[in-house]
Image (cartoon, rainbow, N blue to C red):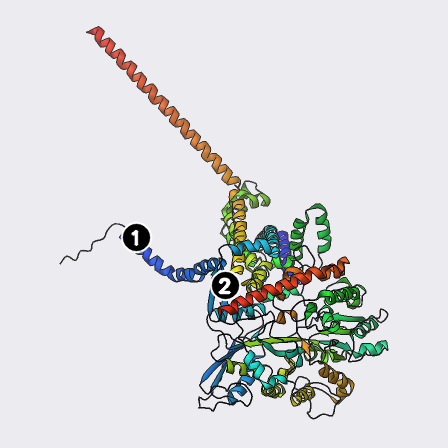
């Protein structure tokens, strides 16, 4: 009997041990993107004979034949379907089939479709541009892009930084989703510490000074916590004519600014201006919970994060009831006015039989004013999507700079200090308007300035620099026992300037190798890519 | 008309075999189409530079250049292979031993046995793929109260760094390793239940302790299952999404200078190392003779010796008999001559 009891207890103990890992992880933010699964929406457009639009612009006319276009994406499935329906209403001879896939393994799925001869006519690409370029998936849309007058009415950086050209002479892709990066400031912390809130048109040094000012050991506050890194922002905010990470100027890397950024970041983290990292003793000492997210403590000055965090988390009762008052600042703008943003790219297939129509569909899905008007209607439709309104599901900002669209967008979903033309949408989750008059008064000016300053975004390196992903994985991140470059500076006290020359060489080499691979692939389909 | 059926000898057996093949035909088709053909294809890919153009796949034959490039330009992969090799060699015995212990505990007559069996099998159902990834990302893979840093420092003092690091990684992923044990526990449980209880009874009557019973009855009986579990564990550990090399191969497939061809070459090198690990364990387990095998071999040796001796004696006896018969014959002949 005794042995039986011992066995029973051992089995119970080990079972408990097995389940140990299932413990909750506190309040780590779950940046929910699109919970889209494979879906296939084929609207039954009546095959009525339609008159082809003869464009007043230099664009060729759309076909009047009955055709079907496929659009593959990792966006919100319901939203995309609404836009597709609106597109089919305008062009009844075109049937649009949307294919929604989750971000997990998205690029792989796209390659599988290509391999099985089912390349969609237009599609989004997730981050890394290399696989699309080295397999010549993206078709040349230069003639359409350059002839389309609507493209003068979009975020200026798309044309000035030649986004989607990838350093070549061909427009192969373009941003179709835009999330400006936000450095969220908790006004409540500044009020508690009785210090001034920085100007919304801050410079880099002002931003760093604010991080330091918000750090107060007596009050237990830290200056900043980062999801996106200030190392990423530094070259764009401080260098002249730089349009990307690591001091990318459109053709090569200039790592001086990057090195200065890494050194400053290491100094700030080691100087305890950065909040403790999760799962450390410091975090436990600060909050009593190792797994706590710094931005949930109410004792953090700035959270450097993505745009979707505002409606997903910071504007929810959970955060507001804890006294936090998060307002967004853009990353400090460079001389050329560039700020940082997350841009998701899309393009038309190099094998599509209907490039003109595919281009038009992509425009509707991405940057066109007509498409955006449809999206705004869908975002404001809180009856159809009452359980979880679409705007809470990672809503991007418009890419078109159409004033009416922006006005409606800002006033419907965010606080504003301006006289309202549009009422804020009703929030079915809270049972009141998404933006109250009080919020307009308190936060309106911050949001107005943010939206005024955010329209010149440049994206992450892997979206715009061929070879960038290979460069990071082989030369920058940790390899075996060797720490990554950033950790070598922070933990081992090395100077980032000592790495700059070698990294610059490796980065440029990786870029040239990737461009050569792209040129080789495009040559196979008869397109000469010059760079 | 002659209706008499002519059957050749062995024809029935052949017909029965054909029916057997018919039954396994769906599996055979699946094997050829979904396993063998992709294996051949991936080897073909590994000898080519591949572009997946929307207009169709473009292949450029480069021989073994992809393989040589991996060794020349891809330190990540080679270092990854090294650490994978060490980690697997250390983690597999841990998992198999743990599974055996749990299986033996669950084989006892304890209350709520079914519940505990379910608990230990549960991770297999719920913790796969993305779930596993999430749990690992949220630091749920290590035992919180275990001071891994301390273990690492201690091991680093006495062992080479590479080895210390591999052992530490086993400790820091302890929960994950325990989660990997579900199927192995099930296999061991089945094997344990098949052991004839009369063996234990007999051993008990001869004064055998539980410890002796384990080493002399349980372990030798389930030895083939240990090999099966080792093979299963190696393959499971090598092919899950947590594996850094799988992630690297996947990333290479999408990179500018990599592609399908290069990634296939990596996959082939990886599978060679994986097979080598399986062979190593197979030789280690099947090569070792347990006490009964040793005794049986000794007994057979002695039996052969005895037979040899017996043969020798018989031959000697026959020889003696013949020479005795000859002598007798001679004597008879002599006597008959004398009498004549």
Which is nearer the eye, B10 or A403? Answer: A403
Q: Residue B54, can we see it?
A: yes
Q: Are marks 2 and 1 in contact (CB under 8 Å)?
A: no
* Residue A149, x across and y down, in percent: 59, 86
The chain letter under disc 2 is: B
- Relative to residue B159, is residue B252 depicted above or below? below
* Residue B198, x across and y down, in percent: 50, 46
**In the rendered view, does B192 fall on the left or right side of A22?**
left
Give the SS element for disc 1.
helix
- Relative to residue A385, is residue A461 depicted above or below? above
Question: Which class describes the residues within 10 Å of circle 2: few (<14), some (14-19), or many (20+)?
Answer: many
Question: Which class describes the residues within 10 Å of circle 1: few (<14), some (14-19), or many (20+)?
Answer: few
Q: Are marks 2 and 1 on the same chain?
A: yes
Residue at the limit of the structure toward the left, as seen here: B1
Q: Name the residue under label 1.
A: B13
Give the SS element for disc 2.
strand
Can you tell which of label 2 and label 1 is closer to the viewer?
A: 2
Picture quadrant where residue B300 is located? top left
Quarter of the figure with the N terminus of chain B:
bottom left
Which is nearer the eye, A171 or B12? Answer: A171
Instruction: Please tell me which residue is depicted at 54% across the width and 68% down the height of the picture.
Output: A519
Numbered label attached to residue A274: none
* Residue B280, x across and y down, in percent: 54, 47
- Relative to residue A161, is residue A83 depicted above or below? below
Which is nearer the eye, A465 or B329? Answer: A465
Quarter of the figure with the C terminus of chain B:
top left
Compute the Cα span from label 2 to label 1.
49 Å
Query: Which callout, 2 or 1, points at the residue further toward the start of the chain?
Result: 1
Q: Name the residue under label 2.
A: B50
């Amino acid at each position: 009997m005794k042995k039986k009891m011992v066995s029973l207890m051992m089995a119970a103990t080990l079972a408990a041990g097995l389940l140990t890992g299932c413990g909750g992880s506190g309040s780590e933010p779950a940046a929910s993107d699109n919970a889209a699964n494979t879906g296939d929406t084929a609207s039954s457009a009546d095959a009525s004979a339609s008159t082809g639009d003869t464009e007043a612009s230099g664009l060729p006319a759309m076909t009047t034949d009955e055709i079907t276009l496929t659009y593959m994406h990792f966006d919100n499935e319901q939203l995309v379907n609404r836009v597709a329906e609106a597109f089919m209403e305008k062009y009844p001879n075109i049937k649009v089939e949307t294919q929604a896939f989750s971000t997990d393994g998205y690029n792989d799925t796209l390659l599988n479709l290509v391999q099985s001869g089912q390349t969609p006519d237009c599609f989004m690409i997730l981050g890394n541009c290399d696989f699309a370029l080295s397999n010549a998936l993206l078709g040349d849309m230069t003639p359409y892009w350059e002839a389309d007058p609507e493209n003068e009415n979009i975020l200026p950086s798309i044309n000035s930084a030649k986004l989607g050209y990838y350093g070549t002479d061909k427009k192969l892709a373009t941003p179709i989703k835009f999330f400006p990066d936000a450095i969220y400031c908790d006004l409540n912390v500044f009020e508690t510490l009785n210090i001034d809130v920085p100007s919304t048109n801050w410079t880099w040094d002002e931003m760093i000074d604010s991080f330091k000012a918000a750090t107060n050991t007596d009050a237990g506050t830290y200056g900043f916590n980062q999801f996106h890194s200030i190392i990423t922002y530094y070259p764009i905010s401080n260098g002249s004519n730089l349009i990307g990470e690591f001091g990318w100027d459109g053709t090569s890397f200039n790592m001086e600014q990057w090195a200065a950024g890494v050194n400053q970041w290491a100094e700030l983290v080691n100087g305890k201006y950065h909040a403790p990292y999760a799962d450390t003793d410091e975090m436990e000492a600060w909050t009593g919970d190792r797994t706590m997210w710094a931005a949930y403590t109410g004792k953090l000055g700035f959270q450097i994060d993505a745009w979707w965090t505002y409606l997903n988390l910071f504007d929810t009762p959970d955060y507001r009831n804890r006294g936090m008052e998060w307002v967004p600042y853009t990353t400090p703008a460079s001389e050329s006015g560039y700020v940082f943003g997350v841009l998701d790219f899309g393009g038309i297939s190099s094998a599509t039989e209907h490039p003109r129509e595919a281009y038009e569909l992509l425009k509707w899905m991405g940057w066109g004013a007509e498409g955006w008007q449809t999206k705004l209607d869908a975002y404001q439709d809180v009856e159809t999507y009452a359980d979880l309104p679409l705007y809470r599901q990672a809503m991007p900002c418009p890419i078109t700079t159409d004033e009416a669209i922006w006005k409606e967008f800002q006033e419907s979903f965010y606080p504003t200090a301006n006289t309202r033309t549009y009422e804020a949408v009703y929030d079915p989750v809270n049972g009141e308007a998404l933006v109250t008059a009080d919020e307009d008064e308190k936060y309106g000016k911050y949001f107005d300035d943010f939206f005024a300053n955010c329209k010149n975004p440049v994206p992450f390196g892997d979206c715009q620099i061929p070879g960038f992903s290979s460069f990071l994985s082989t030369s920058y991140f940790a390899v075996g026992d060797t720490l990554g470059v950033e950790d070598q500076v922070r933990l081992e006290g090395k100077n980032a300037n000592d790495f700059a020359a070698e990294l610059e060489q490796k980065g440029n080499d990786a870029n040239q190798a990737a461009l050569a691979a792209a040129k080789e692939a495009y040559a196979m389909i008869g397109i000469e890519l010059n760079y | 008309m002659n209706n008499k059926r002519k059957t050749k000898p062995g024809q029935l057996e052949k017909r029965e075999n054909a029916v057997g093949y018919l039954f396994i035909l769906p599996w055979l088709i699946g094997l050829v189409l979904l396993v063998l053909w992709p294996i051949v294809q991936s080897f073909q890919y590994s000898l080519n530079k591949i572009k997946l153009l929307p207009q169709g796949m473009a292949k450029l034959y480069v021989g073994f250049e992809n393989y040589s490039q991996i060794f020349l330009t891809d330190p990540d992969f080679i270092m990854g292979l090294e650490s994978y090799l060490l980690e697997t060699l250390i983690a597999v015995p841990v998992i198999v031993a743990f599974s055996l212990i749990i299986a033996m505990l669950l084989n006892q007559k304890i209350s709520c046995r079914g519940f505990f069996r379910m608990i230990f099998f549960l991770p297999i159902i719920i913790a796969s793929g993305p779930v596993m990834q999430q749990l690992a990302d949220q630091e749920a893979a290590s035992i919180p109260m275990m001071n891994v840093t301390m273990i690492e420092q201690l091991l680093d003092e006495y062992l080479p760094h590479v080895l210390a690091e591999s052992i530490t990684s086993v400790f820091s992923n302890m929960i994950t390793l325990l989660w990997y044990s579900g199927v192995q526990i099930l296999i061991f449980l089945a094997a344990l239940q098949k052991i004839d209880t009369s063996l234990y009874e007999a051993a008990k009557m001869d004064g055998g302790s539980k410890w002796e019973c384990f080493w002399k009855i349980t372990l030798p009986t389930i030895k083939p299952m240990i090999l099966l579990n080792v093979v299963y564990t190696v393959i499971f550990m090598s092919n899950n999404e947590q594996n850094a090399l799988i992630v690297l191969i996947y990333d290479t497939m999408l990179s500018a200078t990599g592609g399908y061809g290069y990634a296939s070459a990596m996959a082939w090198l990886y599978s060679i190392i994986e097979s080598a690990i399986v062979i190593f364990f197979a030789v280690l387990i099947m090569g070792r003779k347990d006490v009964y095998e040793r005794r049986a071999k000794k007994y057979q040796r002695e039996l052969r010796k005895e037979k040899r001796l017996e043969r020798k004696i018989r031959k000697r006896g026959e020889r003696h008999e013949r020479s005795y018969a000859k002598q007798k014959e001679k004597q008879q002949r002599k006597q008959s001559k004398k009498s004549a």
